[in-house]
Amino acid sequence: MFAFTKGHNGAWYANYDNDNFKVTIHTRAWDDKATKTRLYISGEAEVDFTAAYEADSADGGPKQRGERLEVDKLFDRLNRQVVRNKKALVLEAKDGDAAVADLLGDLKMTFSRKAGCGCGCSPAFILDGMLTADTEQGAKPVTSIWIERNKEN
């Protein structure tokens, strides 16, 4: 299914391309902490935040959350759409490719803005459990999976 190559620190890596998606898988290195698998998504449909930014900048500039409930609701609605778009891309990848469907299975996915880093720079889905990958050295825990829509699609 996926051809793994040995990396540094005991980690294994696999890259898989089909016509629509590129999938990259990283297994746990010897110095990685045991955690649930993270699923990073890119290439989903964009959400236009222009109206929210304009509303937030009105009346003297941005305010703290809670000071303008209508602006907070607008940002919340747009952020939920971002998550729906990411989830739709995951489902499209699973429906379009048996290897991706087998890899992800039916595990529950929970979106987190801080899945990869506490500052929020790497949002991802946290899978309900640790996936494993078959490598030359046996089954290894998968820490991260990236699914990226190919640019021409």
Image (cartoon, rainbow, N blue to C red):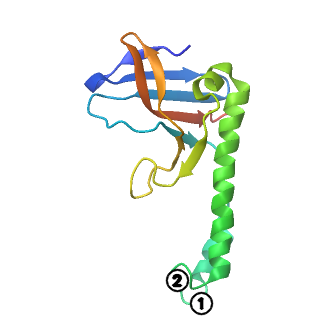
| Residue in the foreground of this view, choosing between 83 and 22 | 83
Asked if residue 92 is positioned above or below residue 9 in the image, the reply reads below
The residue lying furthest to the front in this view is: 129
In-front residue for pair 132/89: 132
Instruction: Farthest residue to the top: give it.
Output: 136
Taking the spot 62% from the left edge, 20% from the top edge, the residue there is 99
- Image location (x, y in percent) of residue 102: 62, 22
Q: Quadrant of residue 78?
A: bottom right
Q: Is residue 36 left or right of residue 19?
A: left
State the image coordinates of residue 149 (x, y, percent, origin top left).
63, 35
Which residue corresponds to the image point at 59% horizontal and 42% vertical from the top-left?
109
Label 2 with label 1: CB-CB less than 8 Å: yes
Which residue does the numbered mark 2 point to in the structure image?
Answer: 63
Residue at the extreme bottom: 59
**Pointer 2 local density, CA inside 10 Å: few below 14, some 14–19, many at least 20:** some
| Amino acid type of the residue that numbered disc 1 sits on in the rendered structure | Asp
